[in-house]
Image (cartoon, rainbow, N blue to C red):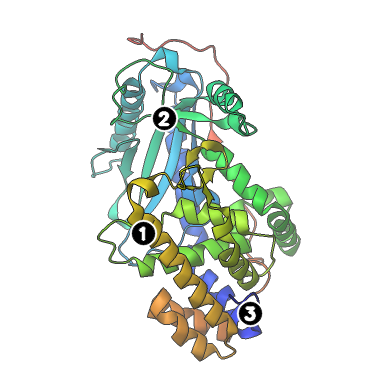
């Protein structure tokens, strides 16, 4: 496929990425929502306070790859974690941990006069905000799991360098959900975010410094969500392309975002323009799909190499076929668009793949104001400091009442 883009195509793809971005206000709302919950968990009357609760964001909000929904009435999904740092797996069951966090979330919901009930998911609690807020939060209860994950990965000869931030999470469909056991489901969103940022660190810090200079602020005052790298923008474009292609996904085959994100981050080579990054990613991402001895696809979690993001492909081969069908289509669509030197031709080319309204808005934006190097470089930096988590001061761990 094409590896270069015309100047018009580059400007168009810059504008397209900007059209997909959510507003800073949305990021600030998301940040305040989990910070507010963290303050509630750490208040003096909280049942969780003695167990050192820390609430932090994960998923696309943490990665900076959130895109505007396809439809105006769709909600944003904020994924967060509540890690009780002063508890361990031998002290309680998954069920008990989830119930503890759920009771405090219910108290928070009532204190905030939220009309919609708290909902329990397989691994999380879902907090539904008012209709006008247009978002909900999925909060995953968790415990520290660094030592067990490090031992496990070391025993397999696998990379355990990110095990320090590993967590144990709950799953109400497991047979041992009500039992006290060391064998809990694993996750490591902080480790994954660290790896992801590492794939774009040079460009991210370069842009943050340039933005700080532009607004005469310190680099530390510029939060991640105010800076967008070509890797993040490329992922956002690919996610929208996926959304349109699988808008009527009756078989649940749409490629999942974590697979697209992981392969794109692997393939990213530090390009400083969106078009260059997008074409490079589409050319290279397939090379990072490994195969085991039985020929099954393996897309390892960089923060936990024992987790295979493509593990469902063996059970549902139609999902693997759907991924490759999407990848081939994206390669054709963006290679063709990149070769065009007329804005109207690019718009016509991408309208069926991205949605007519979005393609038209991107064309209008690219015509009126070519995208610059930085996103929001002239935005005010005042009050830009962000706090990624809340944790109360260190306390001596105590065993919860009724815990074995």
In this picture, residue 309 sits left or right of residue 137: right
Q: Nearer the viewer, residue 315 or 194?
A: 315
Residue 135: x percent and y percent?
A: 36, 52
Q: Nearer the viewer, residue 236 or 81?
A: 236
In space, the residues marked 2 and 3 are separated at their CA atoms by 44 Å
- Tell me if mark 3 has few (under 14), some (14-19) or many (20+) residues whose alpha carbon lies within 10 angstroms of its own: many
For residue 286, above or below residue 309: below
Secondary element at image label 3: loop
Q: Which mark is drawn over residue 340?
A: none
> Which residue lies at the image location 53% right of the left edge and 76% below the top edge?
334
Residue 206: x percent and y percent?
A: 74, 58
For residue 370, above or below residue 117: below
Q: Quick one: label 1 or label 3, which is nearer the N terminus?
A: 3
Secondary element at image label 1: loop
Residue 70: x percent and y percent?
A: 36, 67
- Tell me if mark 2 has few (under 14), some (14-19) or many (20+) residues whose alpha carbon lies within 10 angstroms of its own: some
In space, the residues marked 1 and 3 are separated at their CA atoms by 28 Å
> Which residue lies at the image location 41% right of the left edge and 13% below the top edge?
91
Q: Which residue is mark 1?
A: 254
In this picture, residue 250 sits left or right of residue 62: left
Q: Which residue is mark 3?
A: 5
In this picture, residue 176 sits left or right of residue 161: left
For residue 375, above or below residue 294: below
- Tell me if mark 1 has few (under 14), some (14-19) or many (20+) residues whose alpha carbon lies within 10 angstroms of its own: many
Residue 41: x percent and y percent?
A: 43, 28
Q: Which residue is mark 2?
A: 185
């Amino acid at each position: 496929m094409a590896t270069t883009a015309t100047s018009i195509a580059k400007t168009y793809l810059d504008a397209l990425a900007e059209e997909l971005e959510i507003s800073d206000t949305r990021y600030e709302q998301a940040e305040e929502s989990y910070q507010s919950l963290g303050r509630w968990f750490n208040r003096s009357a909280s049942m969780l306070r003695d167990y050192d609760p820390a609430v932090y964001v994960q998923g696309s909000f943490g990665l900076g790859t959130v895109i505007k929904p396809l439809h105006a009435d769709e909600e944003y999904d904020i994924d967060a974690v509540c890690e009780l740092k002063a508890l361990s797996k031998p002290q309680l069951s998954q069920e008990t941990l989830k119930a503890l966090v759920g009771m405090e979330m219910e108290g928070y919901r009532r204190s905030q006069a939220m009309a919609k009930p708290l909902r329990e998911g397989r691994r999380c609690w879902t907090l539904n905000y008012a209709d006008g807020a247009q978002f909900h939060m999925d909060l995953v209860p968790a415990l520290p799991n660094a030592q067990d994950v490090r031992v496990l990965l070391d025993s397999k000869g696998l990379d355990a360098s990110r095990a320090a931030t590993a967590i144990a999470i709950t799953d109400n469909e497991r047979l041992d959900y009500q039992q006290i056991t060391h064998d809990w489901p694993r996750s490591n969103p902080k480790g994954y975010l660290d790896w992801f940022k590492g794939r774009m660190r040079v460009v991210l810090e370069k842009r943050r410094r340039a933005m700080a200079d532009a607004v005469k602020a310190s680099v530390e005052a510029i939060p991640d969500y105010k800076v967008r790298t070509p890797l993040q923008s490329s992922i956002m474009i690919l996610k929208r392309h996926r959304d349109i292609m699988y808008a009527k996904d009756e078989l649940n085959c749409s490629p999942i975002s974590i697979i697209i994100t992981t392969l794109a981050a692997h393939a990213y080579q530090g390009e400083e323009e969106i078009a260059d990054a997008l074409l490079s990613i589409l050319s290279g991402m397939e090379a990072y799909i490994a195969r085991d001895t039985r020929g099954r696809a393996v897309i390892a979690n960089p923060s936990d190499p024992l987790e295979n993001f493509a593990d469902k492909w063996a059970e549902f081969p139609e999902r693997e076929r759907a991924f490759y069908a999407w990848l081939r289509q994206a390669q054709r669509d963006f290679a063709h668009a990149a070769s065009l030197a007329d804005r109207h031709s690019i718009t016509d080319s991408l309208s069926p793949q991205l949605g007519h309204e979005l393609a038209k808005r991107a064309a209008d934006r690219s015509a009126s104001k070519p995208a610059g190097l930085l996103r929001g470089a002239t935005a005010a930096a005042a009050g830009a400091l962000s706090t990624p988590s809340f944790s109360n001061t260190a306390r001596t761990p105590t065993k919860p009442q009724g815990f074995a």
